[in-house]
Amino acid sequence: MPSRGPGVQSVFAIRREQVVNLLALITGLVHLYAPIFGPWQQLRIVSLALFLALAILMTPSARGGKASFRLLGTAWDAVMLAGAVGVGVYITLNYVSFIDSTGRLTLVWAVVGIALIVTLLEATRRTLGWPLVILALMFIAYAHWGRHTPLLIAHGGAPWADIIEFAFRDSSGIYGVAVGVMASYVVLFIIIGAILERAGAAELLLDLAKRIAGHAVAGPSKVAVVSSSMMATISGSAVANVVTTGAFTIPLMKRTRMPPHIAGGIEAVASTGGIIMPPVMGAAAFVAAQNAGVPYSQFIVAAALPALLYYVALYMFVDLEGRKAGAGSLELKELRSFSEIGRDGWWVPIPFVILVGMLVSGYSPGRSAGMGLLALVLCILVVKGPRRGLGILVEGLIHGTRSTAALMMAAATAGIVIAMIYVSGLGFRFTYIVLQLGGDNLLISLALIGLITIILGMGLPITAAYLTAATLAAPVLIAMDVAPVTAHLFVLYYAAVSAITPPVALASFAAAGISGSGMWKTSFASMKLGMVGYLIPFLFVDRDGLLVLGTGFWDTTYALMTATAGLLALTIGVVGYLRGQISLPERGVLILIAFLFAALQIAWLDVVALLVLAAIVTRNMLPGRAERV
C-alpha cells in the first residue's frame, strides 16, 4: 500500500500557506489604521509581533527529513511563535509598566527581553540568513567583553542587565526609530508597490521604457536604465528590481549583442539606483530623513538632483558601452505606441501625483501614503472592475505584507546593533579614530567612512546597512560641519552601492543568475558601471548646491554644471570610448579630472578641468575618428 506521508505533508503545507496569507492580510489591515485614524502608542509593539509571527510561519523548520527531526522542528517553531505572540501581547497589556519602568530591569522584564531578542534573531536568520545575526551577536559580545578587545576600541564592558535593557527598551534599540518608521508608513509604501505590480503596472512601465529608449543604440540596455528608475517607485529594493525588470531586460540586452556580464551589471546598477531615486525611495531613506531631523519631503528634494545625475551618468555609460560592444536596438514592431500605453495605463500616475503632492505640501508620509493607497484602490476598482479589482487588492495586500517581513526583521535586528554601539560607547571612539586618522582633511574622512559603510553593508539589506553605518559615521561628518541631511545621504549612498560591490554584492549576484555569467565577472562589471555611485556622494558633500539646501540659483547651477562635467569625464575615462577607442593617457587625465571635481571646489581649477575635458572630447569626436556601430 503506497505511503500517504507526502500527501499529508502537502495538505499541511497548503493549510500553513492559508494561515500565512490570512495573517499577512490581517497584518496589512492593521497597518492601515494609523494613516486613517492617526498613530497609536503600541503600534511598534503590535507591528513587530505580527511580523515576527509572519516570518516564523513563512519559514518553518519542519521540512522533510526524518519524522523525529520534523517533530523537533515543529516544536521549535511553536516555541518561537509563542515567543513572538507572547512578548507582543504581554507588552501591549502592560504598556504603561513597560514605559514607566525603563531603567529598572526586573526579572520579569528581563525574561521578556531575552525572549524577544532570541525570537528576533531566529526570525532574522530564517528570513535573511546568518550575516546580520552574526553581526548582532558580535556587537553584543563586544558590549559585554569590551575590556578584552584591542586598546583602541576597548571599554570596561557592560553588564548583561544593561545590554538587555538597551536592546529591549531603549529608544535606540529594537523598538527604535527604524521599527517605528517601518510600522508607521513604510509598510504602506510597500503595499502600494505590491498592488501596482499585481495590477500590471510593472509591464506598463517596461513598455513605456521600451518606447522611450528601445529604438536607440543599445536600446535594451537603456530600457533597463529607464525601467529600473521607474520601477524604483514600486519595489524600493535593488535585488527586487533586478529579479523583476531584469527577467525581461537582461535577455533583451543579450539578444542585441551586449555581453552577458555587462548586461547583468547594467541591470544591477540601474536597480540599485532605485534606492536613492525620489519620490519614493527605499525604506532606508525614510529612516535617514528621520535621523537627519527633516521632513521626508525636504529629504527627497535634497536627493533629487544627485539621483538624476546617477541615472544620466549611467545612461551615458550604457550608451558608450553599447557602441563599444556594437549592441543593437529593438525593432519598431516590438514597441507599443504611446497611445496604446496611455490607454491602458492612464490610471498609474494618479496615486503618485496625489502621494507626492501631499508630501510636498507638508503632510506626513503616513497620511500621504494612506491617501495615495485610497486613490489606487479606487482606480483599480474602476479599471479592473469590482470583482477582479478586489482580488488584485487582496493579493497585493498579502504580497506586500509578506515582502515587508524580512525588512522588518532587518530594521529590528539593526536596532540591537545600534543599542550595543551606544551602550559600549563605540560611537564616540569611532568618531575619535576617524578624526585622528583623517585629521582636518574632510576628503580622507569621507573616503574612510565610505569604505567602512561598504564593509558593514556587505550581505545586509540596505536598511540594516544604513542604520549600522549611520550610527557610527553620521556623527563624524556632522562633527566636521557637514549638514545632517548631507551626512545621512552620504551614508545612504554608500550603503546602497554595497549591493554592487564585491566580494558580497547581492544585486550583482542576482543579475548574474539571470544573465548566466559568472558572479565575480558580473560584480566587477557592476562596480565599473556603477562608478558614478561612488563619486556622486563626494560631489554633493563638496558642492552642497546639488542638494538645494538653502543655496541660491547660481550655486545650484554651478554645482550641477561641474558635477555633470565630472561624471562625463569619469564615464568616458572608465569606458575608454567615444567615436573610437581613447588613448590610455587621455583616459587617465579624464579620471583625474573627475576626481578633481569631486575633491576640490576651486573656481580656476574647475575652469582648467572643463577646458581640458572639452579638448579631449572634441579631439575624439572629430569626423576622422572611426565609430564602431
Image (spheres, rainbow, N blue to C red):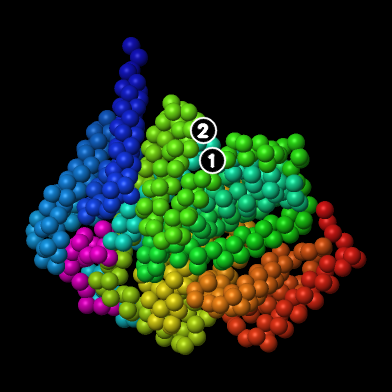
| Residue at 22% over, 69% down | 144
Relative vertical location of residue 439 with respect to residue 520 in this rendering, above or below:
below
Furthest residue in direction right, as rendered: 624
In this view, the residue in front, 93 or 248, is: 93
The residues tagged by marks 1 and 2 sit, at their Cα atoms, a distance apart of 8 Å
Residue carrying label 2:
383
Please provide the residue range marked out in magenta: 154-175
Q: Is residue 158 magenta?
A: yes
Specify the label residue 275 is tagged with: none
| Residue at 37% over, 42% down | 402
SS at mark 1 in the image: loop
In the image: residue 259, left or right of residue 384: right
Tell me the quadrant of the picture where the N terminus can be found: top left
Q: Please rate how many residues cluster around mark 1, counting C-alpha atoms within 10 Å: few if below 14, some from 14 to 19, many from 20.
A: some
x, y (%) of residue 223? Answer: 66, 48
Residue carrying label 1:
347
As shown in the figure, which amino acid type bears the numbered disc 1?
Trp
